[in-house]
């Protein structure tokens, strides 16, 4: 099979994908900009396939078609739902480098809940974009409040930013951000704190 220098994956025009050809072109240019030869053996697949494919996956949060099914079911109580230790992988929008860590979520249902595994899938989807940690934390809290129609949601996210760690610009290795929609009671805040602390 012969290939054009830049080729389409056939879905460029659709909103459920990325502009594949532009991603190839841009990766090639970045390689050239840093003094690499994009046509050497080790790099051919890098710009032609691997980087566009990786960025397609890692920006799924931009596309509603990739959102997990957040079907709810009837809650038997409005007791606080707590899920700790959800893995988070995102790309910082300043450097397009990864930051990663864990999210802890609590919400007080108003009649509806989602499966606990959906919380992790929702966090993964929301994280797959270019973000700043504070904004991602708020987006997860607000998005979940909306999806589950919860009375209150609390999200805490602790992450290591590779743009800081790899460049050696920061000594602090972890950043924690929090976001709340609605208001947790004193007792609910204590329960969440205790769940998060016992996770760590
Ligand atoms: Zn950064």
Image (cartoon, helix red, strand yellow):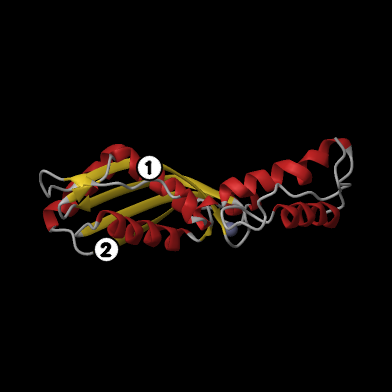
Callout 2 touching callout 1 (CB < 8 Å) = no
In the picture, the disc for residue 107 is none
Query: Which of the pair 160/16 is nearer the observer?
Result: 16
Q: Distance from label 2 to label 1 (Cα)?
A: 18 Å
Reading the image, the residue beneath label 2 is: 181
Looking at the image, which residue is at 35% across and 59% down? 143
Give the x, y percent position of residue 170.
56, 56
Reading the image, the residue beneath label 1 is: 120
Query: Which of the pair 193/148 is nearer the observer?
Result: 148
Give the x, y percent position of residue 188.
15, 52
The response on whether ligand 1 sits within 8 Å of label 1 is no
The response on whether ligand 1 sits within 8 Å of label 2 is no
Looking at the image, which residue is at 30% across and 49% down? 105
The quarter of the displayed image where residue 25 is located: bottom right
Question: Can I make out residue 200 in this image?
Answer: no
Give the x, y percent position of residue 14.
61, 56
**Label 1 element class:** helix
Looking at the image, which residue is at 37% across and 46% down? 69
Q: How many marks?
A: 2
- Examine the rendered structure and indicate whether residue 153 appears above or below residue 86: below
Give the x, y percent position of residue 1.
85, 35
State ligand 1's quadrant.
bottom right
Question: Quadrant of the image for the C terminus?
Answer: top left
- Examine the rendered structure and indicate whether residue 55 appears above or below residue 22: above
Q: Residues within 10 Å of mark 2 (few under 14, many from 20)?
A: some
Question: Can I make out residue 196 in this image?
Answer: yes
**Label 2 element class:** strand
Query: Which of the pair 39/86 is nearer the observer?
Result: 39
Q: Earlier in the sequence, mark 2 or mark 1?
A: 1
Q: In this rendering, would 107 be left or right of 59?
A: left
Q: Residues within 10 Å of mark 1 (few under 14, many from 20)?
A: many
């Amino acid at each position: 099979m012969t290939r054009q220098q830049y080729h389409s994956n056939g879905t460029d025009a659709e909103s459920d994908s990325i502009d594949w050809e532009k991603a190839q072109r841009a990766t090639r240019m970045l390689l050239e900009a840093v003094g690499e030869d994009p046509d050497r053996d080790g790099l051919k697949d890098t710009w032609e396939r691997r980087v566009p494919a990786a960025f397609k996956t890692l920006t799924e949060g931009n596309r509603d078609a990739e959102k997990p099914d957040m079907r709810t079911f009837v809650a038997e109580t409005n007791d606080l739902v707590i899920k700790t230790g959800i893995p988070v992988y995102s790309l910082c929008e300043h450097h397009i480098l990864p930051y990663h860590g864990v999210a802890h979520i609590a919400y007080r249902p108003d009649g509806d809940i989602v499966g606990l595994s959906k919380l992790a899938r929702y966090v993964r989807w929301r994280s797959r974009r270019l973000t700043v940690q504070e904004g991602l934390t708020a987006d997860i809290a607000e998005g979940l409040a909306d999806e589950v129609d919860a009375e209150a949601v609390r999200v805490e996210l602790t992450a290591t930013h590779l743009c800081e760690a790899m460049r050696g610009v920061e000594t602090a290795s972890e950043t924690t951000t929090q976001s709340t929609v609605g208001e947790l009671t004193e007792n609910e805040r204590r329960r969440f704190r205790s769940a998060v602390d016992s996770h760590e």
